[in-house]
Structure formats: structure tokens, C-alpha cells
Image (cartoon, rainbow, N blue to C red):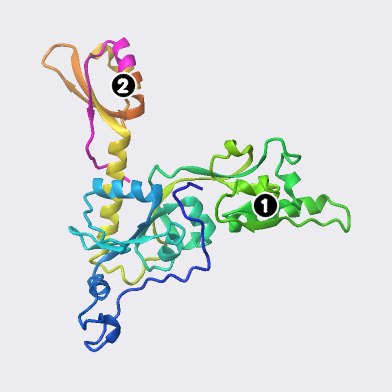
Amino acid sequence: MSGAQTPVNLASSTTLSRPQPTSGNDRAAKSSFGSESAMSLLVDSLKDRLLFAIPKKGRLFEKTVELLAGADIKFNRAHRLDVALVQNHPIALVFLPASDIPRFVALGSVSLGITGQDVIAESTHGDAIKELLPLGFGKCKLQVQVPVTGPKQTIEELAGGRIATSFNVLAEELFAKVDTEANAKAAAGQEVKTSVEYVGGSVEAACALGMADGIESGDTMRAAGLHAIHTLMSSEAVLIAPSTPHASLTPELAPIVDMIKRRIAGVIAAQKYVYASYNIERKNLANALKITPGRRAPTVSSLDEEGWVAVSSMIEKKQMAQVMDELETTGAQDILILALNNCRVNV
């Protein structure tokens, strides 16, 4: 799991619901000075807004804020307040621990959310959630790791041992299968049962302190003398929505979901691609197009010079130096690379 994500707390009692009408005499909505509190005003302002849950801190928060800025979703977050109203759209951002977001989305308390795929799997709410868009950050692997010099070097050898993890739901599912296979081969009366212990932090210390034979983690553990022996899943941050839209997603708000998805997809594409433009003789065009096929197809137009064409194509930013070298070898001239500030792509 990425260090930016918060371990799942299934016992969390945090709740979020649509605002309910309050009477003018409601003392709970008043401050000690008799005026409406800032929170009561904020809750009232959530009416007729799409609720969008994003991670409240860490690396996922930072990358999500960058995406929102690129998508022109403007907001100001008041100090210590976990709800912010978007200024240019009927949207309210709700800042939650990444591990809580799957539950809020699955229950329809919010219409959109951003969190990690590993957190969704751990939440057990995956069936009630649909992934709208992979976001390309927060990538990690959830792995079983053991001491490099330890006596147990396969997942089968861990059967009946002790596992320390902050993903106890996934770990219990995995080792239930490992135990079943081990017990099918064991002699009568020698049934094994792997013990899975939840550890919220410093998981790598569990093996060193003798608390566990192995750990389940997505963090880099080489410095702790550990290495991976099994990969349970690869994960990245994703944009998610409820499988069944909640009644609070009115016909007026529903189009905003697709707008956010398209805008974020455009920001991601602009970060990944650059725009390449060059001139080349038509006789060399076929070879050049193999180098710059584009996301769908390149644009080719005739130049005001016999036998020459101009080509424009999107190419991956990380490959642009190599692409330019290869284009030169095919005879391309006037090769230009232009940065993309934003774009729209089919998603």
C-alpha cells in the first residue's frame, strides 16, 4: 500500500449524509452567541451539490489537488474543515481518510471518490463500486514479504505461522486458501491455522521483533532486510462511483460526473503526451508513421512543395527524445515537440 494511504478502519463511526431541514429554533445549529454556526451554514449549502470525496492528506491528496486544478475545479478549504465548496461548479469536496472513501461511495453518501484500488479491495465494498478511470499515481504492490535470511521463503511455508499486516481482510482471504491447501496435504490431526495480526504502522518491525514470520505490505522493505515472495495485487489511485447511483444524484447533477471524468482524463493525457510535428518526404512517410502512430491516427497534410507532407501526432512524453532520433534517421525535418497544457480524449 502506498504510504499516502491510510489503513482501513472498519470500526470507524464517521458518517456523512445529505442535509436535513432544520427549524429556526434548532439550538444545535446555533453558536453560543445565538447566531448560526459556520458548520450549519455549510451543511445547508451542500443542498443541490454533487459530493466528491478525496483523500484528506498525504501523497494521494497532493496528486488529487493537482488533478482538480488542471480540471479547473476551484475551491478554498477553510482551516480544519473537511468540506469545501467548489466555486465554479455545483460540487462539494469532502476530505476523508483514503480508507473510508470506498464505504462512503458504496453507500451513496458521496457520488464520486478518489482512492487506491488496494483500499477498495480491503474495504469489502468492491461489488458496490465501479471504477471510472485509472489515475496513474499512487501505484504500489501489495506483497507478502519475509526476511531475506529467514527459514521460510515460500508462501506455502508460512502456513500456520504469523502474519503482520495493515490489510488483514485481504491477508485472511489469502492465507485461508494457503491453509486449506496445506491441510489437504497434512497428516490427520496436524491441521494448521495461520494467524493474521493487524498492525497499523511500522509493519516492517514486526519480523525484526519476532512478532511475525512474514508481513503483507506494499512498501519498500529492502532496508529492513525483507524481500517479496508473493504479490497479491498491483494498485493505483482510481476515480470511483457507486455501482447504483444514489437518489441524491439528481438529473441536474448527473452530467457533472461525466464532466469530471472527461476533464480529469484530459489532464492525465496532457501530462503523459506531447505533440510532435515534422515534415517528411512522402516516400519516407510509411516508415515515419510507424514511429509516430498517434493515439488514434496521425494528421498528414500536403506541403506546398512537391513530394513533401507535414505530420502531426501525439507521442508519449517519456519517449520523445528517442522518437526524435528515429524520425531523423527516416529523413524527417523541422521536428517540433510541443507541450500540452490540457486536452480532451475519449474515455
Badge 2 is on which residue? Answer: 289
Residue, x 28% and y 53% (percent of image)?
A: 260
Report the residue that reaches farthest toward the front.
33
Q: Residue visible at 24% across and 89% down?
A: 25
**Side of 171 relative to 253 (left or right):** right
Q: Residue at x 14, y 11 (%)?
A: 306
Tell me which numbered mark, 1 or 2, is placed earlier along the sequence.
1
Name which residue type carries label 1. Ile
- Residue under pointer 1: 163
Q: Is residue 229 above or below residue 184?
A: above
Image coordinates for residue 61, horizontal then vertical, percent:
36, 51
Alpha-carbon distance for marks 1 and 2?
53 Å
Left or right relative to 211: residue 33: left
Neighbours of disc 2 within 10 Å: few (<14), some (14-19), many (20+): some
Dot 1 crowding, Cα within 10 Å, few <14, some 14–19, many 20+: many
Q: Residue at x 71, y 47 (%)?
A: 213
User: Of the residues shown, which amino acid type is indicated by label 2?
Assistant: Leu
Q: Residue furthest left?
A: 304
* Residue in the foreground of this view, choosing between 45 and 27: 27
Where is residue 280? Give x, y as percent: 23, 14
Residue 266 or residue 52, whichever sits in front: 52
205 displayed left or right of 213: left
Q: What segment is highlighted magenta in the picture? A: 323-347
Secondary structure at badge 1 equals strand
Q: Is residue 199 visible?
A: yes
Q: In this rendering, is residue 58 above or below 282?
A: below
Q: Is residue 165 above or below residue 242?
A: above
**Residue 345 magenta:** yes
Q: Nearer the viewer, residue 287 or 253?
A: 253
Is residue 134 on the magenta stretch? no
Question: Can residue 296 be seen here?
Answer: no
Helix, strand or loop under label 2:
helix
